[in-house]
Image (tube, rainbow, N blue to C red):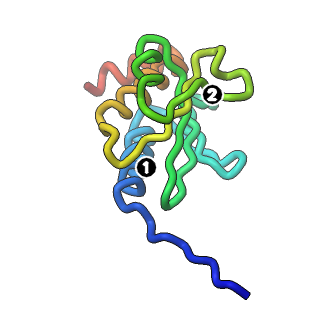
Amino acid sequence: MKSKRTSPPNKKLVDLAKKLRDHALGLPETTEAFPWGESAFKVKGKSFVFMRADPNDLSFSVKLSKLRKQALAVPGSEPTHYGLGAKGWVTLRPTAKTSLDLLISFVDESYRAIAPKRVLEQLAGSQ
C-alpha cells in the first residue's frame, strides 16, 4: 500500500484565513455557521461570506457591487456558481501574495450589502 504524501500547510494561507475569519466575526452581530463543511459568516441570519479554508487552499465568496470588477481582476476569481454570480457574488481564491487589506475591503462591502440598516448604524457608531 502506497503512503499518501501530504504537503505541509501553507502558513501564509492559514494566517490569511484566520485574519479574514477574525475580521468577519468582529463585525456587529455576526455569527458563524458551518453548512456544507464551509464557514458561513452571517449577520442577522443572512450570509455575507462563505469561506473554505484548507491548509493549502483558501476560497471565499462575497456579494459585491462597487468592488466587483476589482475582485474579478484578482487571479483565480470568478462569478460564484449556482446562479449566485448573477446576483453579484464573486468567489476568490487568494494566494499568500494577495493583499489582506483588499480582501478585507471585499468582506466589508459584502457585509454592508447584507446587514440591516439598524446594524449598519452600530458599525458607523463603533468607528
Residue at 49% x, 33% y: name it. Answer: 29
Residue 85 appears in the rendering = yes
Discs 1/2, front:
2
Query: Looking at the picture, how far across and down is residue 76, in whole percent?
Result: 49, 35
Q: Tell me the tag on residue 17.
A: 1
Q: Count up the numbered dots.
A: 2
Query: Looking at the picture, how far across and down is residue 42, in whole percent?
Result: 57, 34
- Which residue is farthest bottom? 1
Residue at 54% x, 22% y: name it. Answer: 63
**Front-most of residues 15 and 22:** 15
Query: Looking at the picture, how far across and down is residue 74, in whole percent?
Result: 41, 29
Residue at 43% x, 21% y: name it. Answer: 109
Within 10 angstroms of label 2, few (less than 14), some, or many (20 or more) residues? Answer: some
Q: Up-down: is 116 above or below 94?
A: above
Q: Quadrant of residue 26?
A: top left
Classify the position of the N terminus by image quarter. bottom right
Query: Looking at the picture, how far across and down is residue 71, in whole percent?
Result: 44, 24
Tell me the residue that label 2 is attached to: 80
Give the SS element for disc 1: helix
Marks 1/2 in contact by CB < 8 Å: the verdict is no
Of the residues shown, which amino acid type is indicated by label 1?
Answer: Ala
**Front-most of residues 81 and 21:** 81
Q: Quadrant of residue 23?
A: top left
Question: Who comes first in sequence, dot 1 or dot 2?
Answer: 1
**Front-most of residues 12 and 31:** 12
Q: Up-down: is 102 above or below 93?
A: above
Of the residues shown, which amino acid type is indicated by label 2?
Answer: Thr
Q: Tell me the tag on residue 66.
A: none
Classify the position of the C terminus by image quarter. top left
Q: Distance between the Cα atoms at labels 1 and 2?
A: 19 Å
